[in-house]
Amino acid sequence: MHEPIETTLVGLEFLVPRIDDALAVFVDVLGFTLADRGPAPGIAAERAILATGDVAITLIEAHDSGSDQVIVDRTPRLTQLVVSAASEGAASSTAQLGRLGLPTEDLPNGGAFVAPEAMAGVIGTSTALVVLGQARADGVES
């Protein structure tokens, strides 16, 4: 058995039916800060990013058409769980996830991506797992 890597939750991404309704709750009632709002890069959707302290919440309202990739299944759900790890831990996560039978894609920062379909067998819902690698506090890759 391998030691688990040390991670920090840094982001949650939700697919929502109406972004304005979600913002009314998260911003107007709960007091989170709207850090950014606009078109989602690469997909036919609107995106809002909320600052909540150490964890960013991204809200996505998918459009049914557009020049970018269209999300076919627009069922509201948690779409991504994003964690951060030191670079060596993120790199180790790819091997550990692979040993569990989960197919991973390597990310440019040394991290790993597990597709929603693969994670569905683990957590019962189609939610991607993203493990981001990060440099040490002094800026040197660890």
Image (tube, helix red, strand yellow):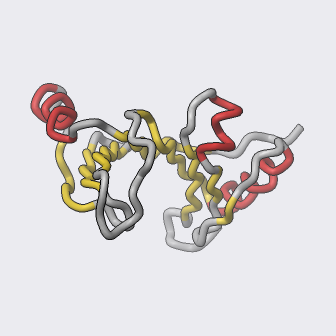
Quick one: which residue is furthest to the front in this view?
Answer: 65
Count of residue discs: 0
Where residue 93 sits in the image (x, y, percent)?
A: 72, 52
Q: Image height check: is 27 above or below 64?
A: above
The quadrant of the image that shows the N terminus is top right
Q: Which residue is drawn at 42% across and 45% down?
A: 11
Q: Does residue 40 lie above or below 27 as drawn?
A: below
Give whichever of 135, 125 is nearer the camera. 125
Question: Based on the displayed image, in which of its 4 quarters is residue 118 positioned?
Answer: top right
Vertical order, 110 against 129 (above or below): below
Q: Which quarter of the rendering shows the C terminus?
A: bottom right
The image position of residue 44, as x and y in percent, is 32, 59
Residue 119 image point, x, y percent:
65, 39
Expressed as whole percent of the image width and height from the top left, the position of residue 89 reads 69, 55
Taking 98 as reference, is 36 left or right? Answer: left
Q: Image point 69% across, 32% down: which residue?
A: 122
